[in-house]
Image (spheres, grey):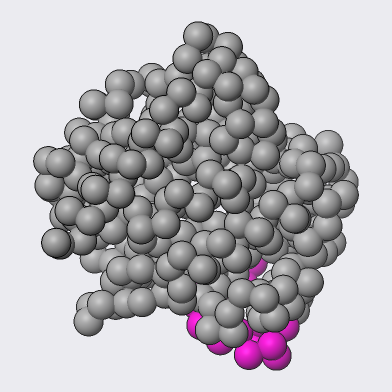
Amino acid sequence: MDRRSLKLKKIKKINELFKGSLENCIICPRRCCVNRANGEKGYCRAPANPVIYSYCAHHGEEPPLSGTNGSGAIFFAHCNMHCVYCQNYYFSQLDTGREMSIENLSKVMLNLQMRGCHNINLVSPTHFVPQILMALEMALELGLEIPIVYNTSGYDLVNTLKPLDGIIDIYLPDMRYSDNEMAKKYSDAPNYVEHNKDNVKEMQKQVGDLVLDENGIGRKGLIIRLLVLPEGASGTKATLKFIEEEVSKNAYLSIMSQYYPTFKAYNYKEISRGVTGEEYANIVDEAFFLGLNNGWIQEAPVNLDPKFWGTNIPPKMEI
């Protein structure tokens, strides 16, 4: 039995497991217990049907994901976090997007494969896992074969992730914080650290270290994103130590310098500026010191005109 057939067989069983899950929604750490199937909304404000802001062949992801043809990114609206510096706030916090049927979501996946995208990149999927699984079943039946990427803020529920073993090929989680106080203050995410660590260990257990094909395209594995925040607010050095000790010494990291203050960040003086070159270099040096040498770094931060910050709303591509 080929990989697609194996996935399809497993996803049918998983969809039975998730049947009715929206009637008492506890799929993320919020455990709101609302009946989304009946129109009730919880913290994420998401309805029963998936809401999509846009989808495209995305060329701005890590090289093994974007490759030459782009990553088939599907940007889901709404979010189960509330980051005051969210760069995607236009659709994650302001809920801009279009509600679509499960069938149409499956067609989007097949369309991205037809364009030659290297993968299906589910951006912020946490609050739509049951709907995504139903769409994947339809798409697999119609020939979807490319890898599935679970691109998440990392505030997931491990019990929701466990059934995804064998379905998700590449996990792409953020590890935003090593201190729950910071997670609560800047993202309103209680107990983020414990959930995040449990999630990343489960992801590593399922897919292991990143595996590339002969063209350098990711086929399976874990990539951990680390967004460096000003004034050490992200606690990234402690996160690196956790990765080295409890995840994998061969883990692939994406250490990002791209933070800039947007959305509500100017209400917090300590993060109302970009990251300095020194702050970023200290994190990169710490990764090398710990022997975490796989992955990617970005260019050193550039001091931008403050007038520029906060205006980088993603263009509405196509839907």
Whether 299 is among the magenta residues is yes
The correct choice, above or below, for 71 with respect to 37 in the image is: below
Q: Nearer the viewer, residue 52 or 127?
A: 127
Q: Is residue 143 visible?
A: yes
Q: Relative to residue 94, is residue 67 drawn left or right?
A: left
Relative image position of residue 301 (x, y in whole percent):
64, 66
The correct choice, above or below, for 186 with respect to 230 in the image is: above
Numbered-mark total: 0
**What residue appears at the point 20 percent right and 40 percent down from the top-left corner?**
139
Q: Is residue 307 visible?
A: no
Whether 281 is among the magenta residues is no
The correct choice, above or below, for 172 with respect to 10 in the image is: below
Relative image position of residue 102 (x, y in whole percent):
30, 26
Q: Which residues are magenta?
A: 286-302
Specify the quadrant of the image occupied by residue 80.
Answer: top right
**What residue appears at the point 55 percent right and 57 percent down from the top-left corner?**
173
Relative image position of residue 61 (x, y in whole percent):
41, 60
The correct choice, above or below, for 202 with respect to 300 in the image is: above
**What residue appears at the point 55 percent right and 66 percent down from the top-left corner?**
224
Relative image position of residue 196 (x, y in whole percent):
67, 55
Q: Relative to residue 19, is residue 137 drawn left or right?
A: left
- For the C terminus, the quadrant is top left
Specify the quadrant of the image occupied by residue 146.
Answer: bottom left
- For the N terminus, the quadrant is bottom left
Q: Nearer the viewer, residue 318 or 197?
A: 197
Q: Residue furthest top?
A: 38
Q: Relative to residue 181, is residue 253 drawn left or right?
A: left
**What residue appears at the point 68 percent right and 61 percent down from the top-left corner?**
197
